[in-house]
Image (spheres, rainbow, N blue to C red):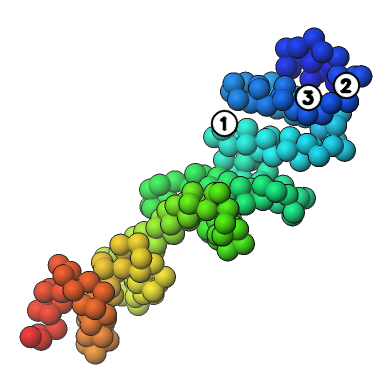
Amino acid sequence: MLLVVSACGKQTDYADENDAAQAMIQCNQLYEKGNYDKATKCYEMFRTRFGGSGYSADAELKMADIFFEKKEYLLAAESYRAFAKLHPSHRKLSYVYYRAGLAYLKESPKAVSRDQQYLDDSIGYLEIGLRYFPDSPYEAETRVAYQEARRRLGARDLYVGKFYYKRKEYRSALARFAEVADEYPDLGLDEEALYLLAKSYLELGERQKAFEVTAILKRRHPESKYLARLVNDLGID
């Protein structure tokens, strides 16, 4: 445990120290001061010395938090995932799922034109947090992150749909616009998606379906700026 002594900058000899709580305090102080490299060493040695204590899992969780604080989000996410598997009944499991989802979200670029491969993982872990821990103190933060992950995924589908639409690949565009309208009606994306969905049907000569989508748009967004355009395109009053 001499490495813990060195890392913590203390002279206490933990080779004869049985107080895991006191040792944990020393490591936590390093973490709170932002001395993450020293804190990591401290937690690693803590787990070696006090691996059978009730604090060992807490030290493991703190090491995942360090990855997160250092903005090494993918490492953090994988560490939280591993923690959830190893400690399925830990008292801070709601926090673990929240942070795993948030880490994957932060690893995903904000620009919808870029690869969003981790958004599904983000949504998956945040959904678990919301579903199984409804009374969690992290419920509000989890929901905010969940909605943001969904918004980005919906924006990505809308972006891809527009790409197909501009290339006049209307069948491919239809699937994307329909998914946005059906899966993300609460995120402010469905208004434009419904408009472009109706336009795609019109381009394909499917006026009845375009009319039906227009009716949905009118019901959801009666003041939509797109309604007048569709009414004119459909030639209806």
Question: Quick check: 129 above or below 193?
Answer: above
Q: Earlier in the sequence, mark 1 or mark 2?
A: 2
Instruction: Identify the amino acid type marked 1.
Output: Lys
| Residue 15 at least partly seen | yes
Question: Quick check: 222 above or below 59?
Answer: below
Residue at the far bottom: name it.
Answer: 208
Q: Are marks 3 and 1 in contact (CB under 8 Å)?
A: no
Q: Earlier in the sequence, mark 3 or mark 1?
A: 3
Q: Horizontally, is 61 left or right of 101 in the view?
A: right
Mark 1 Cα-neighbour bin, 10 Å: few <14, some 14–19, many ≥20: few
Q: Are marks 1 and 2 in contact (CB under 8 Å)?
A: no
Q: Horizontally, is 20 left or right of 106 in the view?
A: right
Residue 17's disc is 2
Rendered residue at 85%/32% (across/down): 50
Determine which quarter of the picture holds residue 185.
bottom left
Residue 23's disc is 3
Mark 2 Cα-neighbour bin, 10 Å: few <14, some 14–19, many ≥20: few
Cα–Cα span, label 3 and label 1: 23 Å
Q: Horizontally, is 58 left or right of 171 in the view?
A: right
Question: Quick check: 211 above or below 172?
Answer: below
Cα–Cα span, label 3 and label 2: 8 Å
Rendered residue at 61%/47% (across/down): 95
Q: Are marks 3 and 2 in contact (CB under 8 Å)?
A: yes
Q: Earlier in the sequence, mark 3 or mark 2?
A: 2
